[in-house]
Amino acid sequence: MNNTKLIGITGNIGSGKSVVANYLKSKSYFVLDADEIVSKIYDSSKYQKTKEKIKQILPECVKKGRLIKKCIKNIIFNNKEKKEQLESIIHPIVIDEIIKTQKKIKQNPKYNKSFAFFVVPLLYEKKLEYLFDEVWMIFAPTNICIKRIIKRDKINEDLVKKIMENQINPLEKVKKADKVIINDKDIESLYNQLDKLVP
């Protein structure tokens, strides 16, 4: 077993979690993003049984046998029941994958970094703090997050706000987090904060 600290990174939509993850990867740290696990569930043949379950609850989001992510996003944020059904299928797989990966890292003598990072957007919403040694919160004001998401995902403001309504107020998360990284200026300011936390 090594002494690697397992860090959960969270933050509301548009706060800049992906930018932080890519910077940490560029410094050779291990980073696993929960959203990447979800993408694999939608796209990989490994999860065929899971996909069939999703197709049953969201048949309108199946095109030529494939699940359409944009359609899923539109429906689940307008339909609480379908959202809960989908999460009951996907979240246990994501949590299981995180735990398995953490064990591999802790048992890997070649991984000699101080930290390993796990990006989990709904970390507090799903009460997953217990999986990590520390939680680092990426914070940006709501108006900045909305602009970033409209630009990035080409979706309208109403949908962005609906997605945000399903997340705990970021200021509440700031109070709970072990470390808070503010991402409301330029990228250099963000990187400077990360450099102070991560050697």
Image (spheres, rainbow, N blue to C red):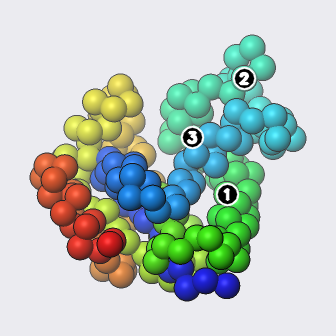
Residue 25 to residue 170: above or below: above
Residue at image x 67%, y 85%? 1
Q: Nearer the viewer, residue 80 or 196?
A: 196
Chain-order first, disc 1 or disc 2: 2
Q: Amino acid at mark 1?
A: Val
In whole angstroms, how far apart are the C-alphas of marks 3 and 1?
18 Å
> Which mark's residue is nearer the viewer, 3 or 1?
1
> Does residue 102 appear in the picture of this structure?
no
Q: Residues within 10 Å of mark 1 (few under 14, many from 20)?
A: some
* Relative horizontal placement of residue 192, taking residue 157 as reference (left or right): left
Residue at image x 40%, y 44%? 162
Residue for badge 2:
66
Tags 3 and 1 touching, CB below 8 Å: no
Residue at image x 66%, y 53%? 87
Q: Amino acid at mark 3?
A: Ile
Residue 73 to residue 24: above or below: above
